[in-house]
Image (cartoon, coloured by chain):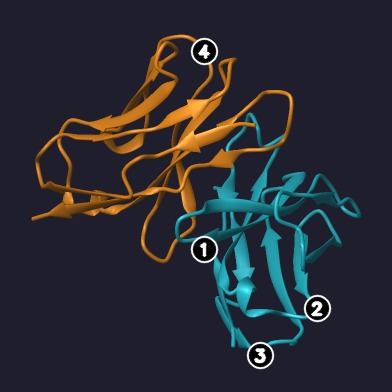
């Protein structure tokens, strides 16, 4: 079964802080995604990647960077965290373009920016 | 632009009752359609998906959904709910020419014992 692991599960930081969220998938999937989930907004795509070294901009990229170091690992970086980035973050993977195929999600990282 | 509307933020039903969660999309062509479920403290999991063929598609745990082109809808149904079905349900759509899946805001289902 597909496995996507996110760390940490919870994170608290201060405004202006530097945060890295990690995601690892062990399904040999090419596509990986970062979403944020906020009440009243569903899931919104931040960045995605279709392979190591590749990065694509999503729908709400401002204030976020991402890096795909290997096929397995996808990181989301908040270099100057702001309270508006307090959210629940999900990583997902798929073996082909996500538009047609199942997304496999991690359990999420809850980030609070004070 | 594509959009997905789930008009009910929260639905409460009694255990054993039937269920319908509504989803409407706005796109002229037929998109890929999905229902995902999110149980407490977990990530989303796929319940079912549709692109073509029989408009009624079966999913896991007794769920099914019916596609209606005339109504631009993809409603989720279950004949008899169980307390363990309490979760948040997301409808999602995508076109086959891009990588994007657009999610609705979700419907929280509460099943009363």
* Whether marks 3 and 1 lie on the same chain: yes
Chain on which label 4 sits: B
Residue at 78%, 80% in the rendered image:
A80
Residue B76: % across, % down: 32, 31
Rendered image: mark on residue B52:
4
Colour seen for chain A: cyan
Residue at 35% over, 40% down: B7
**Left or right of residue A79, residue B110 in this image:** left
The label number, if any, that marks residue A79 in the structure image: 2
Q: CA distance from mark 4 to mark 1?
A: 31 Å
Q: Secondary structure at mark 1?
A: loop
Tell me the residue that label 1 is attached to.
Answer: A107
Residue drawn where x is 69% and y is 64% of the image:
A23
- Give the percent coordinates (x, y) of residue B38: 41, 53
In front: label 3 or label 1: 3
**Callout 4 and callout 2 share a chain:** no
């Amino acid at each position: 079964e597909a496995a996507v692991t996110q760390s940490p599960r919870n994170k608290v930081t201060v405004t202006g802080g530097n945060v890295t969220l990690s995601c690892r998938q062990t399904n040999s999937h090419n596509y990986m995604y970062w979403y944020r989930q906020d009440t009243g907004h569903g899931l919104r795509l931040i960045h995605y990647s279709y392979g190591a070294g590749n990065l694509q901009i999503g729908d709400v990229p401002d204030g976020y960077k991402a890096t795909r170091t290997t096929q397995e690992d996808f990181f989301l970086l908040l270099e100057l965290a702001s309270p508006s980035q307090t959210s629940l973050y999900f990583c997902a993977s798929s073996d082909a373009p996500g538009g047609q195929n199942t997304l496999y999600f991690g359990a999420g990282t809850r980030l609070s920016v004070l | 632009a594509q959009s997905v509307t789930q008009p009910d933020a929260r639905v409460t039903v009694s255990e054993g009752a039937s269920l319908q969660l509504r989803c409407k999309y706005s796109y002229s062509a037929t998109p890929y359609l999905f229902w995902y479920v999110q149980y407490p403290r977990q990530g989303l999991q796929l319940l079912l998906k549709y692109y073509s063929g029989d408009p009624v598609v079966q999913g896991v745990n007794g769920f099914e959904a019916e596609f209606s082109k005339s109504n631009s809808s993809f409603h989720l149904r279950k004949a008899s709910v169980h307390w363990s079905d309490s979760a948040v349900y997301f409808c999602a759509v995508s076109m086959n020419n891009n990588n994007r899946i657009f999610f609705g805001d979700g419907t929280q289902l509460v099943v009363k014992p």
